[in-house]
Amino acid sequence: MAVFASVEELRSAIGVDLGSSNWITVTQERIDKFAECTEDRQWIHTDPVRATDGPFNGTIAHGYLTLSLLSRFLEDLVPIAKVGTAVNYGLDRVRFPAPVPAGARVRGHGRVASVNEIPGGVQLGLEITVECEGTTKPVCVARTLTRYLTD
């Protein structure tokens, strides 16, 4: 995993493979809390008994829960020793090719896709593939846009 001394170092990082983040366990408790926060209480997420007869043989994480973990993965994937401010600017593309079963561990793998100059810093385009331990298909593929400002 690359460690950048400053925002300036990001400018030459296009194409750099950032490796993988630490694993995060997506527990049923985490799924239930996300359901409460978002008011998305669909049974495939929150009812373990009913979900055993459902299409995934158990409860699964919300796609948006998986997506929300990208901010945590970014902490591992793009460590910058000296940065003023980091701001989530958005997403260019997101897909959820496979579900995340309750209790599974996930992690993100990143590659620098673009670095663009913006007033006061750079905008980093990062391709993140989220993998689920024990499966071959990714559970989320996204391109994030983060603005790193030198202040």
Image (spheres, rainbow, N blue to C red):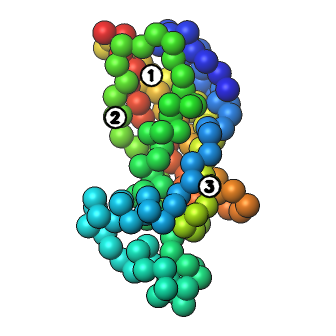
* Disc 2: CA contacts within 10 A as few (<14), some (14-19) or many (>=20): some
Gap between marks 1 and 3 measured at Cα = 33 Å
Q: Give me the residue at 31% from left, 69% from top.
A: 40
91 is higher (above) or lower (below) than 74: below
Amino acid type shown at disc 1: Asn
Q: CA distance from mark 2 to mark 1?
A: 13 Å
Comparing marks 1 and 3, which lies closer to the viewer? 3
Q: Tell me residue 33's x, y (percent).
A: 35, 60
State yes or no: discs 2 and 1 in contact (Cβ < 8 Å): no
The residue labelled by disc 2 is 89
Q: Position of residue 114 (x, y in %)?
A: 52, 28
Q: Which mark is residue 135?
A: none
The residue beneath circle 3 is: 105
- Quadrant in the picture for the C terminus: top left
Q: Secondary structure at mark 1?
A: strand
Q: Which mark is residue 116?
A: 1
Left-right relation of 70 to 132: left
Q: Earlier in the sequence, mark 1 or mark 3?
A: 3
User: Callout 1: 10 Å neighbours few (<14), some, many (20+)?
Assistant: few
| Quarter-of-image position of residue 136 | bottom right
Up/down of 5 relative to 28, above or below? above
